[in-house]
Amino acid sequence: MNCSMNKDHYTDNSTYLSYPLVVYGIVHNYLVFVLGTIANSVALWCISRCTKTNVAMKLLMMSVFASLLVICLITRPVMAERLIASLYCDMTRLDIRVLLGFYILYSFCAQFELAAIAAVAVCRAVAVWASNAHVLRLRVAVGAVVGIFIYSFATSVFLLGPMMANYIKDQEMANVANGVYFFLNTFVPIITTMSCYVAMIIAMRRNGRRMAKVQSSHSRVVNNATRGMFAVFVSNLVFGLPHSVYHMLPRPPLSFDIIFHVLFSMHFVVDPFVFMYFNHSYRRRVGERLWAAWVWVVGRCGAPTPKTPTPLTTSTTTSLGGKETLHRKDQLAEQNV
């Protein structure tokens, strides 16, 4: 039985859901599960294999995509099952305690990602404003990750948890707790990240000549790292801000729940793609692996080996001495990122 049409608890039809919308939500969750798991795994692989980035910065950047990987791999199938239960009026399909736990896990990881992006932006701003070469220490990165973990866990469990479990009976108190929760876990990281990037732009304009001399050997590497993370931040801003505004509404229509969460969950897939696309070295590395896989498939099928494209040919025919020199320069430079 399809009960998506029979959720009319209010006279204004605010809880009306259409059958196609629920089906689309189910399909979308499974697409995010597949594509997001693959894309974020590839992003983690690119960061882990990069020899130009120091371990501390790797830890911060990997924290961003590790949280997205957990969201796509674990929580998306559960959210799809919730919609299937709604579609067929089977409210016992998922235990309410299990569903509550997965909601908290999902919110925790989403908050962790935003806070980790803000931490990367802070480190980049400090590096740009530093008068001398600034090296991000591993203990600082570990402290930042632990702090973000505690921050996200505390707000998810002690603010979101009571609201979802209906422990807060007073509606005004619930609205206040909801506002505080989304302010701390959405607007604070966004404001922090935006402020850091604005500070970086100001520093680069004011100290353009000095930075041209000091960073001439590694400006390409620094720009790649900054460009990739900035693209991830913009993706979060585009897809995440409407989602936060939706949760601040007093009683939005139930159909908005699917629409805004579908929009929000798109960034779980978009983030790793834009990160790799705007980072030239990662994009080249992924392209080379995809081309190697394609050549292997063609070879297994008995077809002639395809001709290697020009960009890949150029990257693989560089002289050994030139590659080693560039690698040493970029590796030393990226230690300051």
Image (cartoon, rainbow, N blue to C red):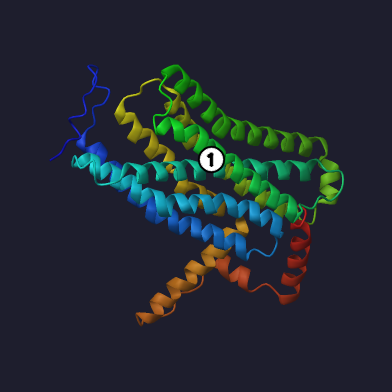
The type of residue carrying mark 1 is Gln
Give me the residue at 22% from left, 33% from top.
Answer: 18
Camera-side residue of 176 and 184: 176
Q: Residue furthest bottom?
A: 302
Residue 309 appears in the picture as rendered: no
Q: Position of residue 54 (x, y in %)?
A: 72, 59
Camera-side residue of 95 and 289: 95
In the rendered view, would you say 99 is above or below 296? above
Q: Which residue is mark 1?
A: 111
Secondary element at tag 1:
helix
In the rendered view, would you say 258 is above or below 66? above
Q: Position of residue 205 (x, y in %)?
A: 78, 36
Residue 301, by quadrant, is bottom left
Left or right: residue 246 compared with residue 17: right
Q: Position of residue 4 (x, y in %)?
A: 20, 35
Camera-side residue of 328 and 136: 136
Quadrant showing the N terminus: top left
Mark 1 Cα within 10 Å, few/some/many (few <14, many 20+)? many
Residue 245 appears in the picture as rendered: yes
